[in-house]
Image: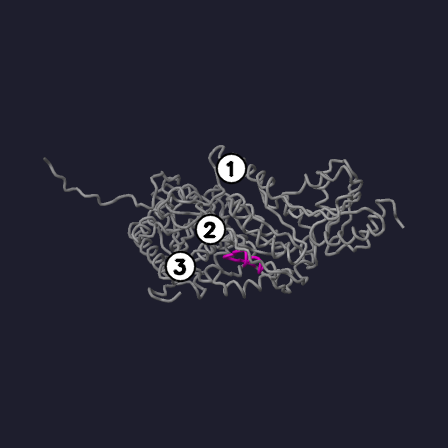
Amino acid sequence: MTTTTEKPVFTRPQTLTDRPMAYCPGCGHGIVQTLMAGIIDELGIREKTVGVAPVGCAVETYNYFNIDMSEAAHGRVPAVATGIKRARPDLVVFGYQGDGDLASIGLAEIMHAANRGENYTTIFINNTVYGMTGGQMAPTTLAHQKTQTTPLGRDPETTGHPMRMSEIIATLDSPCLVARCAADTIPNIRKTRALLLKAFQYQLAGQGFSFIEILCTCPTHWHLSPKDSMDYIGRVLTPIFPCKTFRDRGAGHEG
Amino acid sequence: MSKRVLMNGNEAVAEGAIRGGCDCYFGYPITPQNELTAYMAMHMPRHGRVFVQAESEVAAINMVYGAAGAGVRAMTSSSSPGVSLKQEGLSYIAGAELPMVIVNVQRGGPGLGNIDPSQGDYFQAVKGGGHGDYRLIVLAPDSVQEMHDFTADAFDLADRYRNPVMILADGRLGQMMEPLILRTREPERVEKPWALTGARGREKNIIRSYFSVDGVLEKRNEALQTKYRRIADAETRVDPYLMDDAELMLVAYGTCARLAKAVARDCRAAGIRAGVLRPVSLWPYPTEALRSYLDRVKNILVVEMSAGQMVEDVRLAVEGAVPVHFHGRMGGGVPTTADIRAKADEITGRAR
């Protein structure tokens, strides 16, 4: 009789369903959502967590998370999350938003949810482009970046410069945690996980609004391979969107 | 004997919502409904409930969507321009089948218009307003007492059918004061196994209106239409006044119904057999009730504070069987009983 000494070192988080994600090869959504699922497992909050999905590529996020979730109209995730959390403060609530959703059509909602210090967690996916609609200019699109609606490159003279949302949110007094990180290299993904964990812990402690911006790949609309997209984040994006913590009130701070 | 209290219509709505079990109110300032929001700001926290002044009407309706999705009784209120902004949210709420209550204290339009009473939002309220095939249940009070009672009832109706319910009032009903008896009946409470409460010991719940797989959205729409037919069968409300022998039927709702009733009495004193059919539910519209009088009625006069919106539903119901006349004012103008009476005289050949 043989005995095995092999032990499983990794299993699928309970918070993830076994449904294959429909994202493009090399897309950053899958990395971030897998991290989130692991954190929800780790904190033991799967049965009291409610997510709010945006309009865009991540609309069907509820197919991948094994938790209660709500759709929201384009840009209105912060208002919907506010309604859920105010109605049931015992729930853990997160809003998951892309750059068009959060920084363009939903700018008013995110600013005011942040300013009210709503006790929920915002995960902001910044890949500098609209994904689902076919790769149009976002508020975060870089100067001279080619998109479907800036075919000659974004002209700052007529279309403005990329908006740095973490810096803008950090001008407000209420948020307890505001940080930007990147889902590219293994060390950066680990840092991203640590920030996401901290954001959920702060919410559980009632410390108020947290905002985690994650620089993510969009190989399809960057017209790059998955590998080159990962390199592009460190080479091109982080000089313009620096990865740092802009606000951290620290554990135990009253919200 | 219940004690009568004196309130304006906006406050009566607010107290009706509280007594109807409203857990969360989300609003944004706009005249002529500000007393409602102010009352909720003062009283909701006293009852341990939620009041949030949102950053816009758009945010307020989406906060309602969130709270209603979490299974609590949620409400917003506004006036015409603000209600226009909420139409996107109402479409999502109807699509996701969320119960909620919205109050429109109508003012003059189009555009910024003015802050005077109007019934210019009838089409928006009963024909859709937002995108897609959906219906709101629309109730039209004509007194401060009904402002109060209908709001409390609206929460029960919303829960019973998982459907948005609108109270369609106007600036005059919102601002005027009348005595009323406050509601003491306990709200109906229904189980909401579909709500977002955390997936504990059950499958996950999803609040959604997006169905991209072939054919699913069509099935969803068919189910909605089936529900709407069920609502139409059970919840049509109408208030006939002096209609038993009426040959002239005035049709009016809200503020205009009060004027029409005064005119009907006046007509009868002058020997004209007039009555009023007041639609209380504007959707579902009391089409059958209206048709039931057509064998005796010789003329119909519709009175509105609009260019003529509800009159289209009257004509659809009548199908040409009886002449349908119209008297209306717009832009904050309120018809006078003298003008309505003159129109009645003209129609019945008694013009002086």
Q: In x, y percent, where is residue B133?
A: 58, 40
**Contact, CB < 8 Å: mark 1 with mark 2?**
no
Q: Which mark is residue A210?
A: 3
CA distance separating discs 1 and 3: 37 Å
Residue A156 shows in the view:
no
The segment highlighted magenta reads B14-27
What SS does tag 1 mark? helix
Q: Is residue A169 visible?
A: yes
Q: Which quadrant would residue A195 be assigned to in this image?
A: bottom left
Looking at the rendered image, the quarter that the N terminus of chain A falls into is top left
Query: SS class of the residue under badge 3?
Result: strand
Q: Determine which residue is flagged by label 1.
A: B220
Q: Which residue is mark 2?
A: B71
Question: Does the residue at mark 3 contact the one at mark 2 (Cβ under 8 Å)?
Answer: no
> Horizontally, is A139 left or right of B142 in the view?
left
In this rendering, would B72 be left or right of B130? left
- List the single residue furthest toward the front: B1
Q: How many marks?
A: 3
In the foreground, A158 or B80: B80
